[in-house]
Image: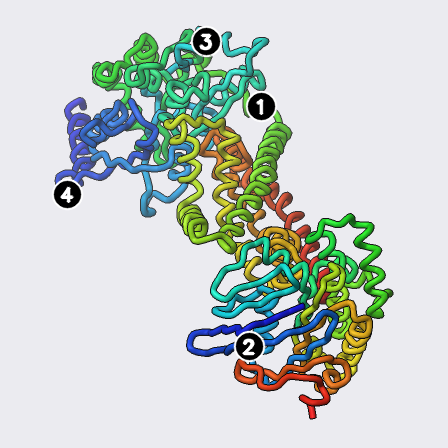
Amino acid sequence: MIRVNNVVKSHGPLRVLDGVTLEVGRGQLAALVGPSGGGKSTLLRCINGLEPFQAGTIAVGDAISLTGGVTPSRAVLLNLRRTVGMVFQQFNLFPHLSALRNVMSGPVYALGRPRDEAEAVARRLLERVGLGAKCDSRPGELSGGQQQRVAIARALAVNPAAILFDEPTSALDPQMAAEVLAVMRDLARDGNTTMVVVTHAIEFARQAANVVFVLERGRVVASGPPDEVLK
Amino acid sequence: MPAARRFLAVAALLLAASPALGQEKPLLRWGTDPIGGGPYVYEDGAGKETGFEWDLAAYLADKIGRRPEMRKGDWSKLPQLLDRPADAAGAIDIVLNGYEKTDELEKQYASTIPYYAYRLQLLTRENTGIAGWNDLLPAAGRPPRTVGVLEGTVAFSYMQKKYGDRIALSTNPDVATVMGEVADKERLDATVQDNPAATYYLGTTPKLRAAGPPVQPGFYVIYLRKTDTDLRDKLNAAIRDGLKDGTLQRVYRKYGLWSPDQEWLCYTQTGEWPADVDALPADDSTAGNPWPRMLSQLAGAAGMTVLLSVTSFPLAMLLGMLVALGRVYGPWLVRTPLGVYVEVLRGTPLLLQLYFIFYLLPSVGIALDPLAAGILGLAVNYSAYEAENYRAGLLAVPRGQMEAALSLGMTPLTAVRRVVVPQAVRVVIPPVTNDFIALFKDTSVCSVILITELTRKYNELYNFNRGYIVELAFVTAGLYLLMSYPLALLAGALERRVAVTRGGRP
């Protein structure tokens, strides 16, 4: 589903990604772990086309590929982002919209779906992440864990083939982190969505991941099933 | 005894002249507004002041043993200069600048006998179809006649009283502007001027035509402080002598201003003044309680102020938002010119921009009527400020918002429209409402382009109701406050509403 081949990205003299190669199969949950500054979040942002990179290729599915040093066309970027969703460390919910309208924003504004159809989907998704009662709340009225669960519902609403999670629980206290991880486990059990998760929650990676990649100083230093890599 | 009297007279003369012997002659500081133009006081081609009143001041000063010194001031505010003490900086002794004899002014200031008898002349250009005064009346199939007059003149009150709402009367402080609007820019059909100005401009403006007979005789007098009775008597004697011995006739003939009215003036001035009260212009504008009339006029003008504000500000907001989006998200080729746009409009006075739009654009074929020019000028000027407000607002929206929107598959344009702009607008509500209140008051600048809004109306009114200057000022200020305070309340309410919807507590 996602194939990263020898990707290089530099900030000036600093090589943030130094020839990263990895592959995540359809329906798998891949955990990216490793020390801070190892390049995990940068890799995720490259996969979603939010940051350019200098060399290598990133392919998503059969049709979409990004090449280092080449500015992707708008059409490619649009196609990529409708295939790959993203959940951010700081949630990035739209503060001027209710939880329901946040979840509806993708289907309505990006895909042009009718409002009533999008609303039905959004209510179902909020129900699924345990926030059926919070449809009309604004992000400012929700706890951090609730906000992140709305963000996951928002990413799911456009029905992406894969979702990238960028440290989804780092900004949360342990109890709220547990709520969010429970939602993600639930998602992984379905097996419909490919998930790439940058995380420091080793226990979660051990239990839920199919495959684990360890990034250090911009390189993959270890990979494999969690039992082998996370001893 | 005759010998003794002669001796006394000579002694008095010597005493009076003694300062002149010991030192320079005392000054006769005469207030005038050279911008008022020919033939009163103006600069000739060589940049030297001239004009019939310049010559008159020279004659009068010489006659009473003083040295003339011209002091410049804004024409409509010249009498107020007499309210300042004679020894204050910039003080004047007399106002000598085509000031008409009116009851209003004579209540507050002393006046001399008249030095010139004028009449009102209707001026137009060839293609208006105006051949006389009655052609100003409304007719089917064409809009009401537009007539320009100088503010604070008898011509203004005469036209207002005689024609009322049947013509579109507008005022301007600058005679050259009004003449230009009639003769060349053709945004005014006609103007009514005192015959000296009419004579002068007919001679210098080829397209200008006189229409109908001169009407409504009146007198130019010199105004001075009520306490300066001695000076007034001397000036009266000097004018009388000048009328009798032909000096003034020579001056007036030099400028083509001699008319049968002046012969009659000479005749009446040999006797007591005023000789023929019936010849004075009828002036019943002060009859009865003036407040209902003044208040209704002020309220009407306040309506124009509101109209200017509510039409120009939404335009300014729209323009400003487009400029801000271009500056934040546009490529280099868009950003740079927009940056120049903002700096030029912020860095030059609104007044100048209005002049440019109204008086200079017609020379490249864009002739806007006053209201359109005013709205456009205000909108363009304020768009620069709004652009900066919105730019700050757009930059205040966290980067993650844009990224989240893009990651959902929105196009950049949709992301800006649906996610960034709605948040930016909430951030900028306080500075934008603040600017709206500022624009509301800046509409007064539009008075320079023939728009009668609240401040201009105040100026018009106090020229004819000088007993109420202070009261009128308070009422006008009160009207502004009455309209801007609800705006401030509205701004506060909006801010509180947004604070709640953003999830914060007010």
Residue B428 left/right relative to A202: left
Q: How far apart are marks 3 and 1 (CA)?
A: 33 Å
**Residue hosting label 3:** B130
Q: Residue A137: x percent and y percent?
A: 79, 63
Q: Residue B324: x percent and y percent?
A: 52, 51
Vertical order, B186 against A120 (above or below): above
**Residue hosting label 4:** B23
**Which of these two is toward me, B503 or B156?**
B503
**Residue hosting label 1:** B287
The kind of residue tagged 3 is Ile
Of marks 4 and 3, the one in the foreground: 3
Local SS, label 3: loop
Q: Do labels 2 and 1 share a chain?
A: no
The kind of residue tagged 1 is Ala
Label at residue A20: 2
Q: Is residue B152 visible?
A: no
Local SS, label 2: strand
- The residue furthest bottom is A231
Residue B416 left/right relative to A87: left
Q: Distance between the residues labelled 1 and 4?
A: 50 Å
Q: Are marks 4 and 3 on the same chain?
A: yes
The kind of residue tagged 4 is Gln
Of marks 2 and 3, the one in the foreground: 2
Q: Residue A22: x percent and y percent?
A: 61, 76
